[in-house]
Amino acid sequence: MFVHIDVIVLKALSILFPIVFLAGISYTLYQNLNKYFLEVNNATSFNRDSVNILRKKLFVNWIYINAGIGVLLIIVYYFMKLIIL
């Protein structure tokens, strides 16, 4: 049975796209967490207010990243479903 090269390329892209996407998201998360932890380590005084502000930044950033991952995984799911079926 003859399979067109377009189908093979699209199926390969549908497999590689989520892997590359998740690697990019995890690297972005690592950079953001590293930035905030460096801010904590470089602070001259560890008063409660500055630590609480950094915790709020981390929590809000965590919510945005998880929401973004959730939305993009749904998009990837329908993209793969469209290509495979």
Image (cartoon, rainbow, N blue to C red):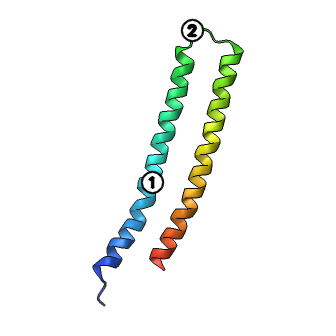
Position above or below: 53 against 69: above
For marks 1 and 2, the one nearer the N-term is: 1
Residue at image position (61%, 9%) is: 45
Q: Quadrant of the N terminus?
A: bottom left
Q: Residue furthest bottom?
A: 1
Residue 66 falls left or right of residue 21: right
Q: Which quadrant would residue 2 be assigned to in this image?
A: bottom left
Where is residue 15? Give x, y as percent. 41, 65
Q: Residues within 10 Å of mark 1 (few under 14, many from 20)?
A: some
Q: Residues within 10 Å of mark 2 (few under 14, many from 20)?
A: few
Relative horizontal placement of residue 64, taking residue 52 as reference (left or right): left
Mark 2 lies on residue: 44
Picture residue at 39% right of the left edge, 72% below the top? 11
Label 1, label 2: how many angstroms apart (C-alpha)? 37 Å
Percent from the top left, x then y, of residue 21? 45, 54
Q: Is residue 45 above or below residue 59?
A: above
Check disc 2 and report its element: helix, strand or loop: loop
5 horizontally vs 22: left or right? left
Q: Which residue is mark 1?
A: 21
Disc 1 to disc 2: CB gap under 8 Å: no
Name the residue type under label 2. Answer: Thr
* Residue at 55% over, 59% down: 73
Helix or strand or loop: what does disc 1 sit on?
helix
Which residue appears at 65% of the width and 37% of the height?
60
Residue extending farthest to the top is 44
Q: Which mark is residue 47?
A: none
Please determine whether, in this image, residue 18 is positioned above or below residue 8.
above
Locate residue 49, reporting x and y percent. Answer: 70, 17
Q: Is residue 38 above or below residue 24?
A: above
Give the amino acid at mark 1: Phe
- Rendering coords of residue 76 (x, y %): 51, 63
